[in-house]
Image: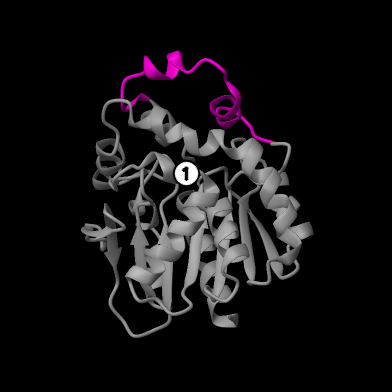
Amino acid sequence: MSDIHPRFRTIDGLSIRYAVSANSKPAALLLSPWPESLYAYDPTWTRLAEHASLIAVDLPGFGHSDLREDLLSPQAMGDFLVRIADAFDLDQPHVVGPDIGTSAALFAAAKAPERFRSIVIGSGGAVSPTELGTPLHEWVHDEDLSPYRALGPKDVVNVAMDAIQGYELPDVVRQDYLAGYQGQRFVEQMAYVRAYPAELRELSKLLPGITTPVQLINGKNDTVVPVSNAEYLHERLPNSRLDVVDAAHFVWEENADEYARIVTNWWQQH
C-alpha cells in the first residue's frame, strides 16, 4: 500500500494533482517525471519524508494535472514552478525535478535566484545541441508525428515501464501511470520536449549565472538521456555536484535507496 495519497487543488485556473507528507521540517517540492506521475516517488517517499515536508505535484499537462498548451515548454514550466511554490506558501523549498523537471527547475532558478533553497535534477535533456538517446531523440526531432497519434493511449507508457530495470512497479503505481493517458495526451505532451532545441540553447546562456545549489543525479547506464547531459550542467553551473548512479534512466525507481541517500544527504548540507 502506497504512502502517497493524491488530492487536487486549483492553481492559476488549472486542476493540479498533488500529495503531501505532514511534518514541520523544511519543505521539498517534488516534480513528476515523464511519462510517469508523482507516484514515481513511491519507493523513496518514506525516506525523503523523514528529512523534509514533501509536496509532490503532477506538473500541468503531465500525470493527472490539467494540460494547457502555453505551459508546455521548459521556460514556461519554470515560471509555473514559482506559482506552485507560491500557491503552497512554500518559503525557499528544496526542489526535486528529475527528467523533464531538470530544465524547468533551472529556468526557475535563473529567473528567481532566491526562491529555492536547492535543486536536485538530472536524467533530463540539457545539452545544446541535444544529445539524446532512443526514443527521446525521435520524440524531439521527428518531423512527422502521425505514427505517435496512431499509438494506443497507453502504448508509450507500457514501453517506458517495461524499460525500468530491476524494479517491479507496484500495481497501484502502474495503473496510475496508465490512467494519466487518454486520447492524444501523449502527443500533446511531446510539445514540451520538442521545445528543447530552442530552449536548451537559451538555457545554456543562463547556466553560469545560476547561484542556487544544484545536485545532479544521473543513471550511469541511461540510454534515453545520456550522462553527458548531467556532465554538461556540472561543468557550467557554478554551485553544483554530480553523482552518477548504477542505474539506467529511471534512477529514482531503479536504485531508489541510493537516490534517497544522495537527496537526503544533500538536504542535510543545505
In which quadrant will I find the C terminus? bottom right
Q: Residue furthest right?
A: 235
Q: Can you say whether 86 is above or below 60 in the image?
A: below
In front of the other: 107 or 41:
107
Q: Amino acid at mark 1?
A: Gly
Q: Is residue 165 magenta?
A: no
Residue 81 position, x and y percent, is 45, 60
In which quadrant will I find the N terminus? bottom left
In front of the other: 108 or 4:
108
Residue 183 position, x and y percent, is 27, 26
Where is mark 1, residue-wise?
Answer: 166
Q: Can you say whether 30 is above or below 93 in the image?
A: above
Q: Can you say whether 81 is above or below 171 in the image?
A: below
Q: Is residue 108 visible?
A: yes
Mark 1 neighbour density, 10 Å: few (under 14) some (14–19) many (20 or more): few
Q: Which residues are magenta?
A: 131-155
Residue 216 position, x and y percent, is 63, 60
Question: Measuring 58% from the left and 24% from the top, which residue is drawn there?
Answer: 138
Left or right of 19 in this view: 59: right
Question: Measuring 47% from the left and 44% from the top, which residue is drawn there?
Answer: 166
Left or right of 109 in this view: 237: right
Q: Residue furthest bottom?
A: 24
Question: Measuring 38% from the left and 18% from the top, which residue is drawn there?
Answer: 149
Q: Is residue 255 visible?
A: no
Question: Measuring 45% from the left and 65% from the top, which residue is drawn there?
Answer: 82
Q: Secondary structure at mark 1?
A: loop
Residue 205 position, x and y percent, is 74, 53
In front of the other: 217 or 82:
82
Q: Is residue 141 magenta?
A: yes
